[in-house]
């Protein structure tokens, strides 16, 4: 072959993809049992709706092949209508636009929004529909996941529903404290598979999943999903394993914290090993009865030496944890019976000090606006308060 022709052919070839960086064995020790560990990603933390919503809307607006959204609540308000319009605009351009929404969440918030989406060419499914003749477990199991996948190149997941409660001053919202992760790299394909599988399981037609995504960074990720049948408690197992591996610090924040006996014991055992344990909760929960139930668990944690903080002012809706500055997770999963044992949930866990450091920095930044709860304060609660807390605890354990 002439040299000039060979040079022309070589110029037309695509360079081989970069291999993912090696996995650090010490960091991987925080991942529970063998599973899908995805290397070569870039994960970025987005704080609240004012940071996350513009990025999500921008990604939808740039979609060329697909935009898949899964959410628990999709409010028919200013934020919800912005997403409605963005999704319809891409559907009319021939993009594969699909929405999975929990039936209960939709009934509480949508107000006719989904009929408008369907009329605009968006494919919409309600998950766990509220039929009177349905099996009882379908009423008490919800799709609580939050996920947006665009073109197989970027995904967003975290605690944010679509609506004004999660938006800040930019949108005139309530400014609930929440987190969203923007993920680029091969983990996007793993997240897209979750959407595609649920779409099929929920009665939809089979859909093509995005191809394998190229390496985008050095973050090592594990996708944690409570599935319909298998791995129903995957997020819980991941939390327990990471807590048991901790040797320096455990930092947890969550909107709804009601640890079961095993998780409570794991946190107490960590304190006995000399691990610092810090738990941040809302000072004023949007579900007051749940706050009473959570407070029923304070005494044992405080007696073991854990530190508990309640955030004042805005509602804390984020669900995140950082362990030893090396393992971090954020997502949709609350630390209560519904999320850990029943619901469809989705968290992303990342090992390495870069992402863990960013999330820990945000959590530490909450502390100046928190009120620390002391053991003496808990011991001083009246009999009436303690009985109310016990009643709420039993309600949420057995409901």
Image (spheres, helix red, strand yellow):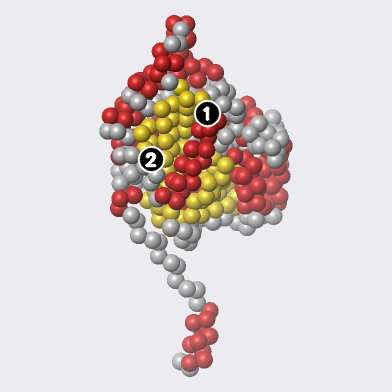
Q: Decide: is 259 above or below 161.
A: above
Residue 159 position in % (x across, y down): 53, 37
Q: Nearer the viewer, mark 1 or mark 2?
A: 1
The answer to whether any part of residue 23 appears in the image is yes
Residue 103 position in % (x across, y down): 57, 30
* Residue 255, disc: none
* Residue 370, disc: 1
The residue positioned farthest toward the bottom in the image shown: 2
Number of marks in picture: 2
Which residue is at a point 44% across and 6% down the rendered structure image? 383
The answer to whether any part of residue 262 appears in the image is no
Mark 1 in CB contact with mark 2 (< 8 angstroms): no
Which residue is at a point 33% across and 24% down the rendered structure image? 304
Which of these two is toward me, 95 or 187?
187
Which residue is at a point 53% across and 32% down the rendered structure image? 368
* Residue 323, disc: 2
């Amino acid at each position: 072959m002439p040299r000039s022709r060979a040079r022309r052919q070589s110029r037309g070839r695509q360079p081989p993809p970069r291999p993912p960086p090696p996995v650090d064995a010490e960091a991987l020790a925080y991942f529970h049992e063998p599973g899908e560990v995805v290397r070569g990603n870039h994960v970025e933390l987005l704080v609240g709706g004012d940071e996350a919503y513009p990025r999500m809307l921008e990604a939808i607006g740039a979609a060329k092949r697909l935009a898949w959204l899964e959410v628990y609540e999709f409010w028919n308000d200013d934020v919800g209508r912005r997403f409605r319009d963005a999704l319809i605009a891409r559907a009319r351009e021939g993009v594969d636009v699909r929405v999975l929404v929990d039936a209960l969440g939709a009934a509480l918030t949508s107000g006719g929004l989904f009929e408008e989406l369907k009329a605009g060419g968006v494919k919409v499914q309600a998950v766990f529909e509220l039929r009177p003749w349905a099996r009882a477990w379908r009423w008490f199991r919800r799709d609580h996941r939050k996920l947006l996948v665009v073109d197989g190149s970027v995904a967003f997941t975290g605690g944010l529903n679509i609506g004004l409660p999660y938006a800040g001053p930019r949108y005139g919202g309530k400014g609930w404290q929440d987190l969203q992760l923007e993920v680029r790299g091969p983990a996007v394909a793993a997240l897209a598979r979750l959407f595609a599988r649920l779409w099929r399981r929920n009665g939809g037609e089979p859909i093509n999943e995005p191809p394998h995504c190229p390496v985008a960074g050095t973050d090592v990720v594990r996708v944690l999903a409570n599935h319909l049948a298998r791995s129903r408690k995957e997020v819980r197992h991941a939390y327990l394993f990471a807590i048991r591996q901790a040797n320096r610090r455990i930092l947890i924040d969550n909107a709804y914290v009601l640890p079961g006996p095993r998780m409570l014991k794991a946190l107490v055992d960590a304190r006995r090993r000399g691990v610092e344990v810090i738990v941040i909760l809302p000072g004023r929960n949007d579900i007051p009865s749940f706050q009473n139930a959570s407070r029923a668990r304070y005494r044992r944690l405080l007696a073991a030496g854990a530190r508990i903080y309640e955030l004042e002012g805005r509602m804390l809706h984020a669900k995140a944890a950082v362990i030893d500055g090396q393992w971090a997770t954020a997502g949709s999963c609350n630390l209560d019976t519904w999320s850990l044992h029943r619901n469809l949930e989705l968290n992303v866990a990342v090992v390495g000090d870069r992402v863990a450091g960013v999330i820990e920095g945000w959590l530490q930044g909450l502390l100046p606006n928190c009120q620390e709860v002391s053991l003496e304060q808990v011991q001083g609660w009246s009999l009436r308060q303690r009985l109310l807390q016990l009643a709420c605890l039993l309600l949420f354990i057995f409901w």
